[in-house]
Image: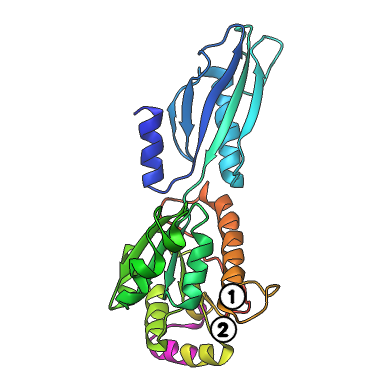
Amino acid sequence: MDWIDALQALRSSRTPAVIVTLALVRGHAPRNGGAKMVVSPDAVFGTVGGGNLEATAVDRARAMLSAGSAEPELLVLTLSDKAVTEYGVQCCGGEVTIMLEPVRVTPSIAIFGMGHVGLELARILARHEVDLHLIDSRAEMLAAERIGVPGESGVFADSVARIHTTLAPVPESALAGLPAGSHVLVMTHDHVEDLAVVDMSLRTEGLASIGLIGSSSKWARFAKKLRELGQDESDLARVVTPIGIPEVAGKQPAVIAVSVAARLLQLIDEAAADEGTADEGTADEGALEEGPGA
């Protein structure tokens, strides 16, 4: 499998990777400039020359994966008998500059309920490189004349996110189609729907976080119902409500959306460090800190 096919396969399986490129070669080196390989947490595809050069690059790429690095790095290696590393000596006589480019897993966010807050939140998140799932039981909330068409018109005209709209008369059924590691936000127009989505979210493996819009009194009622449905205290602790960051206060839909989006972006960065060492298909139980969501 060449590096391009490998990278596509890793992206499809939601596995982070680092593209390693011989960006510049001076003198003699095992490969010419432009040679590439792809490093994942547990595999290497392609080669940039083997030996000390490649082992050093793989080691640095794996360190970047473990740290959840998002920015590319340059690594300069001298290939001489005077440059001894833990991986041995390569005395080709040249010098190489290696570029390491992290390719992080595209975050997945699911908004259940495309009312006023949901639409404002989608408007913000659409400007980020995420898989954005918009789910509602009402066809009119997802109509093209309301939200526009990605790349053409409306709210998502200049979207960089991949937008997925799902009309689900039974909203909780959409959970089965979400990628592992998705962040779920529950803000439907109906408390019965909210409860059903939260209950099923707690029964769905691999979700990164579960946030519920609402007041403390709403959560008290929900917690009682969820216990009756068989959820225990550790399950209830996974649900955070209100959602967002407390520093952004206010009850206007746009304000709540800013608060929630800010916290989600924090969670995404925090989770990236774990993706490099986590097994495929697992996710942290990240929490959406309490904020102004009402």
Q: Is residue 144 left or right of residue 80?
A: left
- The quadrant the C terminus occupies is bottom right
Residue in the picture at 45% in, 54% down: 161
Instruction: Identify the magenta region.
Output: 223-234
Magenta segment's dominant SS is: helix
Residue in the picture at 56% in, 57% down: 268
Res 198 visible: yes
Q: Tell me which numbered mark, 1 or 2, is placed earlier along the sequence.
A: 1
Q: Is residue 177 left or right of residue 271?
A: left
For disc 2, the neighbor class at 10 Å (few under 14, some 14 to 19, many from 20) is some
Q: Kindly identify which residue carries mark 1.
A: 256
Q: CA distance from mark 1 to mark 2?
A: 8 Å
Res 179 visible: no
290 or 160, nearer to the observer: 160
- The quadrant the N terminus occupies is top left
Amino acid type indicated by mark 1: Ile
252 or 210, nearer to the observer: 252
231 or 71, nearer to the observer: 71
Q: Kindly identify which residue carries mark 2.
A: 294
Amino acid type indicated by mark 2: Ala
